[in-house]
Image (cartoon, grey):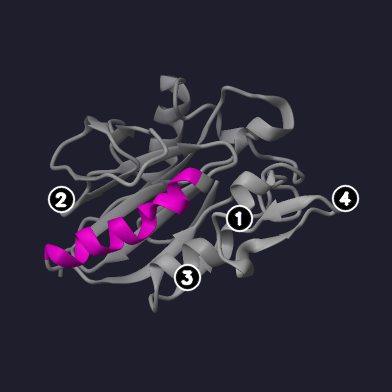
Amino acid sequence: MIRPAPGVAFTLAADGDMRSDEAARARAASLLGIAVEWGTVDQVHGSDVVEVTAAGAAGRADAIYTTHPGLPLAVFTADCAGVVIVADGAVGVAHAGWRGAEAGVVSALVEAMARTGFEPHAAYVGPHIRACCFEVGPEVLTRFPSVAQTKTTWGTDSLDLVPVISGQIGVIPVELVGSCTRCTAGHHSHRADATADRMAAIGWIPASRPG
């Protein structure tokens, strides 16, 4: 598990299947000191954003945020990027594969949080398939700006999600967390082995300390 900041965590393959394995989720929650029940969405590779006030499934969307301290939110990934957006008094998470990135899911989350009075001040982009391994066809590549168009390590067309996601985050400081899910050991990767298991990008508002 990677914990780049208070209220932010990214699980790894060793932590288990966060989407379907309740015991694995419970272990992760215990390690993080958070509730076992999380706010989640039915991920559809789009740009819809939902605000939640309680744990459980919040419908079809690819981004979710809350202003409730202690309520963990999560999206599940196995090559797509999980993005955690942090504001004073709010936190959001987004699921950004190439379809979600093209649709602007991360900017939609940032804007939704800002509209409700919570200006993000930090962003964390979790482990995902990087340009070294993200082979795509021209029908995908040409949908993105030239800064995102590159080559794999074996010379075929590739998409770099980092500048796309960073551009949607804007001026907010961004920290890239982890490495390529396909070619680096320790990750669930659908491209590498067609796994159905998923890692999680988790965000929550830590409870205030007394005093």
Residue situated in front as seen by the camera: 110 or 203: 110
Mark 2 closeness class: few <14, some 14–19, many ≥20 residues within 10 Å: some
Looking at marks 3 and 4 on the same chain, the residue that comes earlier in the sequence is marked by 4
How far apart are the two marked residues, 3 and 4, measured between alpha carbons? 28 Å
Looking at marks 1 and 2 on the same chain, the residue that comes earlier in the sequence is marked by 2
Find residue 197 and report its horizontal and vertical position in percent.
Answer: 56, 25
Read off the residue under disc 3: 174
Residue 68: mark? 2
How far apart are the two marked residues, 4 and 2, measured between alpha carbons? 46 Å
**Cβ–Cβ below 8 Å for labels 1 and 2?**
no
How far apart are the two marked residues, 1 and 2, measured between alpha carbons? 40 Å
Read off the residue under disc 1: 142
Read off the residue under disc 4: 154
Mark 3 closeness class: few <14, some 14–19, many ≥20 residues within 10 Å: some
Residue 113 drawn in magenta: yes
Looking at marks 1 and 4 on the same chain, the residue that comes earlier in the sequence is marked by 1
**Cβ–Cβ below 8 Å for labels 4 and 2?**
no
Residue situated in front as seen by the camera: 170 or 57: 170
SS under mark 1: loop
Amino acid on which the number 4 mark rests in the picture: Trp
Q: Is residue 90 left or right of residue 30?
A: left
SS under mark 4: loop
SS under mark 3: strand
Find residue 156 and report its horizontal and vertical position in percent.
Answer: 81, 50
Amino acid on which the number 3 mark rests in the picture: Val
Q: Nearer the viewer, mark 4 or mark 2?
A: 4
